[in-house]
Amino acid sequence: QVQLVESGGGLVQAGGSLRLSCAASGRTFSSYVMGWFRQAPGKEREFVAAISWTGTNTVYADSVEGRFTISRDNAKNTMYLQMNSLKPEDTAVFYCAARTYYSGNYYPETWGPWGQGTQVTVSS
């Protein structure tokens, strides 16, 4: 199965931008639907965005729609999350995840494998 490693997190001021990357190794990256999730302290892990196998279809949580952009480069086995206009409430550990099917169900329990996460902190 595919192994996932996130990078690109850090500390940024409100209104700033960050780009997260999720590098995949192992089985064919293009056979997976990919997603981003986040978990803030004391809160449950929540869906952020997902992208279909070729990148044709994307979906976003309402809280990030218009600010975040998910993309993938299958030639580089990498998925990205461009985050603009960041807010303090975006502070969380961001995780990438994979699954083999595309559906409207974005509960974290239906995804796997997972990366180890990367911390994003937005200061006010």
Image (spheres, rainbow, N blue to C red):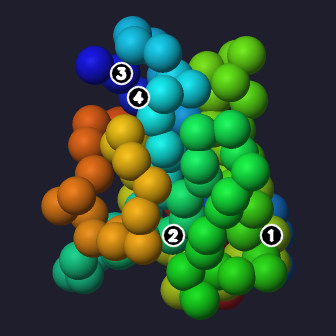
Contact flag, marks 3 and 4 (Cβ < 8 Å) = yes
Q: Which amino acid does label 1 sit on?
A: Asn
Choose top left, top right, bottom left or bottom right for residue 123. Answer: bottom right
In this view, the residue in front, 121 or 112, is 112
Contact flag, marks 4 and 2 (Cβ < 8 Å) = no
Looking at the rendered image, the quarter that the C terminus falls into is: bottom right
Q: Which of marks 1 and 4 is in front?
A: 4
Label 2: how many Cα within 10 Å (few below 14, some 14–19, many 20+): many
Horizontal side of residue 52 vs 2, given as left or right: right
Which numbered tag is attached to residue 48? 2
Q: Mark 1 points at which residue?
A: 84
Q: Residue at x 18, y 61 (%)?
A: 109
In this view, the residue in front, 120 or 45, is 45
Q: What residue type is labelled 2?
A: Val
Q: Which residue is drawn at 48% across and 15% down?
A: 28
How far across and down, in percent of the image, does residue 101 sit? Answer: 39, 48
How far across and down, in percent of the image, does residue 9 sit? Answer: 58, 48
The image shows residue 75, relative to residue 74, as above or below, that is: above
Q: Which of marks 3 and 4 is in front?
A: 3
Q: What residue type is labelled 4?
A: Leu
Cα separation, mark 3 vs mark 4, equals: 7 Å
Q: What residue type is labelled 3?
A: Val
Contact flag, marks 1 and 4 (Cβ < 8 Å) = no
Q: Which of marks 4 and 2 is nearer the N terminus?
A: 4
Q: Mark 3 points at which residue?
A: 2
Q: Mark 4 points at which residue?
A: 4
